[in-house]
Image (tube, helix red, strand yellow):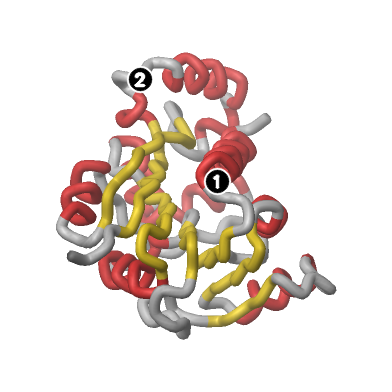
Amino acid sequence: MDSHSQSFNERAELLLNHTSKGDTILNVGSGPGVLYEILRNKANLLVECDLSHENMKVARYKSSGDENVFYTTADMTALPFQNGYFDTVCCIGAIEYVKNWQVAVDEFLRVLKPDGKIIITFANKILITSYYEYFYRHFTWLIKRLFGQFQANYKRYLHTPKQITLALDAKTININKVFFFAYKILPDPLNRLLNDLEMKLVLKASKQTQIQKYVATQFMIVAQKRNKI
């Protein structure tokens, strides 16, 4: 199993453990339905939302005939839903591409019921991810030469868990748990060449709780909306 597959499995397991059966779930930044089957098993009603029309076409095809899944193309900073509608709002692997992420979180809270759950992943600002962003922005030509066809990702915004928790504490949110995952010791593209070594190092590091936040490229916030007094 490569590091990408491992990261997906970790996200999937965390979602399964922290979503409730029978919920009305909004999945923001859903992409082409990669988490559809996982969330559909929990949701009484699932709404998939993404900025890309093409992603929504692919996602609709995957769930063809499912009457309890709906799709909408929208910006996460301006969601087209009524206040207090959803039991759970998920945003997995998407908010890291949004500069004004706090505006997006405010929208998540607006459409969330009182005491509703919010589950968001962020790109962790550690040495490896900072290197990744710099290297891929400035040395795309070298990567193409060494590894062939290559398409750079959209710009990502990196944050530390402390930055995020401090910002969220100022909102109507109670943070229940912070999870670290997607451990990476060697930067891309070296980890592709040394996959076995990478996986051994990752396995060892992931078991050391005191260093997890320094080697995890992603972290997940599981929180609950507070009732306004």
Residue 108: mark = none
The percent coordinates of residue 56 (x first, y second) are 65, 75
Q: Residue at x 48, y 60 (%)?
A: 88
Q: Among all residues in the image, which is located at the extreme right?
A: 65
Specify the quadrant of the image occupied by residue 12.
top right
Indicate the secondary structure of the residue bearing disc 1: helix
Q: Residue at x 47, y 74 (%)?
A: 85
On the image, the x and y values in percent for residue 19 come to 54, 49
Task: Tell me the element at label 2.
Answer: loop
> Residue 6 appears at what percent x and percent y?
60, 34
Please tell me whether residue 169 is drawn above or below residue 200 in the rendered image.
below
Q: Nearer the viewer, residue 133 or 10?
A: 10
The picture places residue 48, in percent across and down from the top left corner, at: 60, 70
119 relative to 97, above or below: above
Image side of residue 94 versus residue 131, left or right: right
According to the image, label 2 marks what residue?
209
